[in-house]
Image: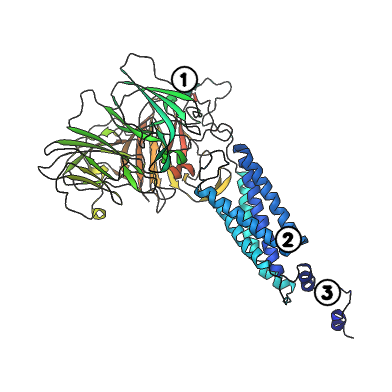
Amino acid sequence: MSVIDAVRAPGNTVARSTGDLVRRRFGGRSAARIYAAVLLTLGVAAIHFAAAAGHLAEYLPYGIFFIGLGLAQVGLAVATVVAPSRRLFIGAAIATTGVIALWVVSRITGLPVARDPWRPEIPGMMDMSATLLEIITVVLFGLLIPTPRKPKARGRTRIALTALPAVPLTLLAGWMAVGAVLHPMAAAFSAAPAVAGQATTSVADLVAAPGNEPLRAFTLTAGVVNIGGRQAWAFNGTVPGPELRVTQGDRVRVTLVNRLPDSTSIHWHGIRLPNAEDGVSGVTQNAVRPGSSYVYEFIAGDVGTYWYHTHQDTLYQLPLGLYGPLVVMPRAGIAEHRDYMLTAHWSPDGTILVNGSRSLHLDATPGETVRLRIVNAVNEGLFGGNPIRPVLLGARYRVVALDGHDLNGPQEIGPERIQLGMGQRADLAFTMPPSGAVELAGLAGSSRVVIGDGPMPAAVKVDSLRVFDLTAYGEPAPDPVADAGSFDVTRDLELAGAPAFYNGTYDFSDTFSGYTSPNVPPITVREGQLVRLRIHNTTADKYHPIHIHGHVFTVLAKNGHPLTGSPVHVDAILAAPHETWDVAFKADNPGIWMLHCHVLGHAYAGMSMTINYEGISTPYTMGTDSGNVAE
């Protein structure tokens, strides 16, 4: 009898080939599919263990859930090899499908059992990768359920080659998990900690000095409301919140009452005020907890158009409705007959509204002068951050102010699109024509604002109109910062982004010179210094409105070309793809101040940093231990 005949003989106890043994162990099922399912299940388990590390500090039940899920998946992988069965594969396919469904619900509607019940979570690269691997394992377990009638003989090499595609996917999942653990979310990060033995002033002590200025007192109650059948978070029950209109020199006192299910705060966007009143959770205060209140007080020193919004968990809270307009009027009043504040913002169904309306009508009669104060509160998602580009049709107009600050010698233009990044503002002034209405168009979709009555302006192709150029508008004038010639502190900020590890995950990031928050080195200054920043957007498809707190940028140059028109003072500079802007400011307001992209998703993804004055520290921290989440 030959060796082959002996091996094939019935009842022979000589070891069969690896392929025969594997087929018998797995009941004739594909060993390649089983090994692939095991590898991918272990890869997903690694990601869930990594996610547990951050969740344990942030929300204990979630941390326990992810540890349990990871252990269950390890157990499933072992059972798949040691005790494979049809029942096991059916249970594995059903259970994994349930995990996928739970992830989908958590990203669309949120979950009832959570730190913030029914709050949708933002999909990330790591959790989407885990879900993709889970979908593949469901398919593999589904293919393993039937018992093959006639198993096919497969050798070790063929089994290995067939299972090979699962190896890089599993290694990728493991790499993500290890990297996430090595780059944890900050538990308690201080932007400027006090140093033992060094005298410092706390930001908590940087408040408005007592005085007898005229007092304007307001109460803003943050609560959950129903608007148009959808849940919103709002100040005093409206989105946008109530317009606060004060006069230059007034002492403004605002009491925030928090009736939300989560902590919150109020930042006074564009207002130069004492650092303690800036409203940034974890930098200038602790977030105001549910059921608590907090008082902000400052002197309205700068005339202009501003706005206020939450600066706690901003990416989530602001789009829900926690924002409103703020106007500081000159004591002598303004020249225009009519003065309107227009806040552009997202509606719950994804269209742009103005003051809560898709079609807003404003009163004005022929010959009257009108001022439109436009605030861009539209959060353009996580990626591009595209600006809005409103244009006035039916009358020539002047751009009299940007970000609340007057331009010198503004001339009439029209029609030109005014490009506004998220958080930026523009004041337009015009005279109503002898007959017919004027329209503010170019917002998005069908949203529009009509001023006056009568025939509408002739339709134009808005996208073909030129974009307003702030670098060559108005009349030149002396400016102490622009004319300084030299600067005490200079810093180049390269705006970029790429997938990276940060805050306990692996995801798309947006960076300042290669760093993500909270690891971006701060800009350190002394009071009285002049500071120049060169902001270069290296991306091909992202707009970055870089916003400074507590100060005002003087715009020096665009793409290396100095301004030829009016001096321009703004609190945010919009850097379009491949643009470079030179801006400067005087360090005349001590504190620890945020400098960040005002596209909320970009700041959340790392494009946030601080300007730190020497001798100033903060007792507040950002991170899971404190509950303060500035972005």
The answer to whether 447 is drawn above or below residue 248 in the figure is below
State the SS at label 2.
helix
| Residue 456 rendering spot, x and y as whole percentages | 17, 49
* CB under 8 Å between discs 1 and 3: no
Whichever of callouts 1 and 2 sits on the residue coming sooner in the sequence is 2
| Residue 465 rendering spot, x and y as whole percentages | 23, 52
Instruction: Tell me the distance, in whole angstroms, between the alpha carbons under discs 1 and 2.
Output: 62 Å
Instruction: Tell me the distance, in whole angstroms, between the alpha carbons under discs 3 and 2.
Output: 22 Å
Q: Is residue 522 left or right of residue 410?
A: right
Q: Tell me which residue sits at (50%, 32%) in the image.
A: 263
Per the rendering, the mark at residue 80 is 2
Per the rendering, the mark at residue 205 is 1
Instruction: Spot the residue most to the bottom.
Output: 1
Per the rendering, the mark at residue 16 is 3
The answer to whether 19 is drawn above or below residue 386 in the figure is below
Count of numbered labels shown in the rendering:
3
Q: Quadrant of residue 584?
A: top left
